[in-house]
Amino acid sequence: MCDWSKAQSPIACDMSVLSPVEREMHLARSRELFTKLKTIKELSDGYEFQLGHELEVILKVAEFVEVERLCCPFLNFAIEVAAENGPVTLRLTGPEGVKAFVREEISALLGNVIDWDVIDRTQHSE
């Protein structure tokens, strides 16, 4: 049985797993997804992004994870869809150093519009 906790991929995005066309499509879809951002919570090992509640958001989050897990195998992904038509939440977590990586990647996607110093730093309990 494979011990996933021992996997040690470097914290670096390997965009070579995508063709140039796939890469551009992924970046465009990712930008579109993260424009739906409602709140961000800092976790001890990553970030939690609360997005809209529409069906299209659920589908875009699933597409994002499908591609992102190929180029960033070090990331853990968790998708939560709240009851009563509540928001979709995407958690990106991983080993030490992943928070800086996520901040850089999301900032690059959105043109540095997020003030990471003022996000919610409440701890998420699992």
Image (cartoon, grey):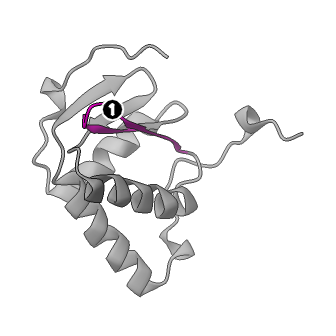
Q: Is residue 79 magenta?
A: yes
Q: Residue at x 46, y 26 (%)?
A: 45
Q: Name which quarter of the figure residue 3 lies in.
A: top right
Q: Is residue 13 visible?
A: no
Q: Nearer the viewer, residue 89 or 81?
A: 81
Q: Is residue 72 magenta?
A: no
Q: In the picture, which quadrant includes the N terminus?
A: top right
- List the single residue furthest toward the right: 1
What residue sits 68% from the left and 42% below the top? 8
Q: Which residue is mark 1?
A: 82
Q: Is residue 124 above or below residue 31?
A: above
Give left or right: position of 17 versus 51.
Answer: right
Location of residue 13 in the rendering, given as x and y in whole percent from the top left corner = 48, 59
| Nearer to the camera, 118 or 68 | 68
Q: Amino acid at mark 1?
A: Ala
How packed is label 1: few (under 14 Cα within 10 Å), some, or many (20 or more)?
few
Residue 126's spot in the image, x, y percent? Answer: 49, 17
Q: Residue furthest front?
A: 84
**What stretch of residues is rendered in magenta?**
75-90
- The correct choice, above or below, for 16 with respect to 72 in the image is below
Most foreground residue, 97 or 24? 24
Which residue is rendered at x = 27% and y = 59% of the image?
Answer: 56
